[in-house]
Image (cartoon, grey):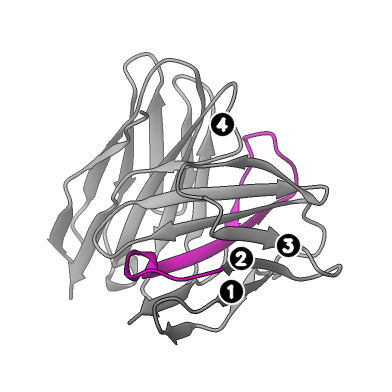
Amino acid sequence: ILNVEQSPQSLHVQEGDSTNFTCSFPSSNFYALHWYRWETAKSPEALFVMTLNGDEKKKGRISATLNTKEGYSYLYIKGSQPEDSATYLCAFSHTGAGSYQLTFGKGTKLSVIP
Amino acid sequence: EPEVTQTPSHQVTQMGQEVILRCVPISNHLYFYWYRQILGQKVEFLVSFYNNEISEKSEIFDDQFSVERPDGSNFTLKIRSTKLEDSAMYFCASSVRSSSYNEQFFGPGTRLTVL
């Protein structure tokens, strides 16, 4: 059974603070790691797809790193804003049978206090 | 910007009834998926669909579930005889190709409540 874990489960930060959270996943048969941002009542929005060990991706104030050998990814938000409040989901896909499906973590719910 | 749409946004049904959840994937996408999230739990994969047939399905996707692409635009999930434990948010997703890279684009979900 593939297990993807995210921590913390929830996080409250002040506007302007920088923050980060973790996604851990099985390191064997790795194919890709996806980060999504999900606001209530909206579609989960794809942030990054990461495939190579050591990958770093950036989109505005949000960035992510990937370590496939040890099976973790970090998502960083610099200078959090109230509009960053959302649940951040990571999802893992692996090689071989089952490679179409994404296996999700439970998410980290971020609340940014103005 | 193209997006995946789902209808209805909320469906309430009685146990034992059939429901059909509808999705319109992004128009040039070839791969289609259904996921669900039971309240408080992880988003779980149900099924993937390509070229008018199921590519993969999870253990959750038993004989009570079926999927169909009845025309060139819609993708549906049918639950034949709903159970209380089918209450969940159901997400449709689509992708251009199966490589995963496989960036999957999600709809906003249909909340199914089984009474």
**Image-based side of B31 in relation to A30, left or right:** right
Residue A112 location, x and y as percent? 20, 67
Q: Is residue B90 magenta?
A: yes
SS under mark 4: loop
The reply to whether discs 2 and 1 touch (Cβ–Cβ < 8 Å) is: yes
Residues at discs 4 and 2 both on one chain: no
Residues at discs 1 and 4 both on one chain: no
Q: Is residue A67 visible?
A: yes
Residue at left offset 54%, top offset 76%: B18
Q: In the rendered structure, find residue A98 and report the number of the disc placed on it.
A: 4
Residue on which the image places disc 1: B21
Residue on which the image places disc 3: B68
- In the rendered structure, which amino acid carries the disc numbered 4? Gly
Residue B8 location, x and y as percent? 55, 84
CA gap, disc 4 and disc 2: 20 Å
Residue on which the image places disc 2: B77
Magenta-highlighted residues: B80-105
SS under mark 2: strand
Q: Earlier in the sequence, mark 2 or mark 3?
A: 3
CA gap, disc 1 and disc 3: 11 Å
Q: Estimate how packed mark 2 is, as few (under 14), some (14 to 19) or many (20 or more) residues with alpha carbons within 10 Å.
A: many
Residues at discs 2 and 3 both on one chain: yes
CA gap, disc 3 and disc 4: 20 Å
